Image (spheres, helix red, strand yellow):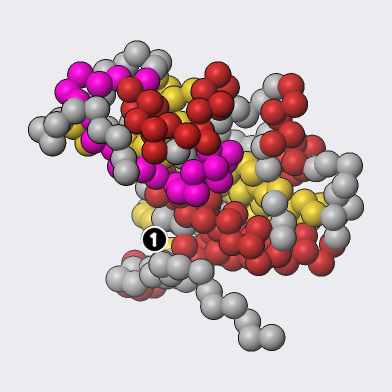
Amino acid sequence: MEQLAGPMTGIRVRVRLFAIQREQAGSRSVELELAHGATIEDAWAALVARFPVLAPGRPSVRFARNGAYAGPEEVLADGDEVAVIPPVSGGEIASERRRILELRAAPFEPGILEALAGQLATEGDGAVVAFLGRTRVSPGTPAPGQEAEAARHAGRRVLGLEYETHESMALAVLEAIADEVAERFGVERLAIVHRVGSVPLGEPSVAVVAVAAHRDAAFAAARYAIDETKARAPIWKAEHFADGHVWIGEPAREGPPPRPEP
């Protein structure tokens, strides 16, 4: 039973777990009820009371409150979201990082695929499959309701793209896709990195890298990761023309596709 730090008249917060802590607790998020004036450290204590297995990780975790890093002494308010941030680099813990799931406003650096592979690959991996998606001059399929605007720009060149996202939800979807890749193909080391904001013509907008012992699994994982990202992640794309723009896409799929029958 969840340990409460105060009466029912206290505050409610949502704690999000990632990577090691998520696996240990067997949950992505936990709702806690705390007393008024409770701190992030108090939230951690309540979390550990529910999941004692998390306790040894305290020296190596950091915290974020509502999307920004915060100290353990910071006081929480009703409805806050606390994220437990596992280690991302340094020493032996670096080898535990098996996923890179990011949204980036800055342009990708040259050699991003090699850089991602270098962060993920181990001596036991014999295959690296990488995909790089770029903006193109030809238009895509207009979103429902955008057909008339698309017809107005028929035959014109796309000058660039604009990506908009629900960031926290998009990252959660990418995490779910990575879970599915691990379950379906046995591929634990995966990167999905997507641009947000303006992306000029010809620049990369999404990078996917799958690393595995064997090529069949790596190919399948990379294909699944990019297909599901495009189908499910709340990332919206507008194609810009000289005198307007058109939103592109289809209604999002809410969950993974069915497994193929054996």
Tell me the SS state at disc 1.
strand
Does any portion of residue 133 appear in the rendered image?
yes
The segment highlighted magenta reads 18-41
Q: Position of residue 166 (x, y in %)?
A: 37, 47
| 28, above or below 148, in the image | above
Side of 259 relative to 38 (left or right):
right
Side of 130 relative to 78 (left or right):
right
Query: Does the segment drawn in magenta span residue 26?
Result: yes
Which residue position holds label 1?
247
Q: Position of residue 188 (x, y in %)?
A: 70, 51
Quarter of the C terminus within the rendering: bottom right
Q: Which residue lies at the image location 55% right of the left edge and 30% below the top edge?
A: 86
| 29, above or below 157, in the image | above
| 83, above or below 207, in the image | above
Query: Does the segment drawn in magenta span residue 182?
Result: no
Amino acid bearing label 1: Trp
Q: Position of residue 181 (x, y in %)?
A: 64, 60
Q: Which residue lies at the image location 30% right of the left edge and 20% below the top edge?
A: 39
Of residue 54 and residue 30, the one placed in the foreground of this image is: 54
Q: Quadrant of residue 65?
A: top left
Q: Which residue lies at the image location 67% right of the left edge and 25% below the top edge?
A: 89
Quarter of the N terminus within the rendering: top left
Q: Quadrant of residue 73?
A: top left
> Residue pushed farthest front?
1
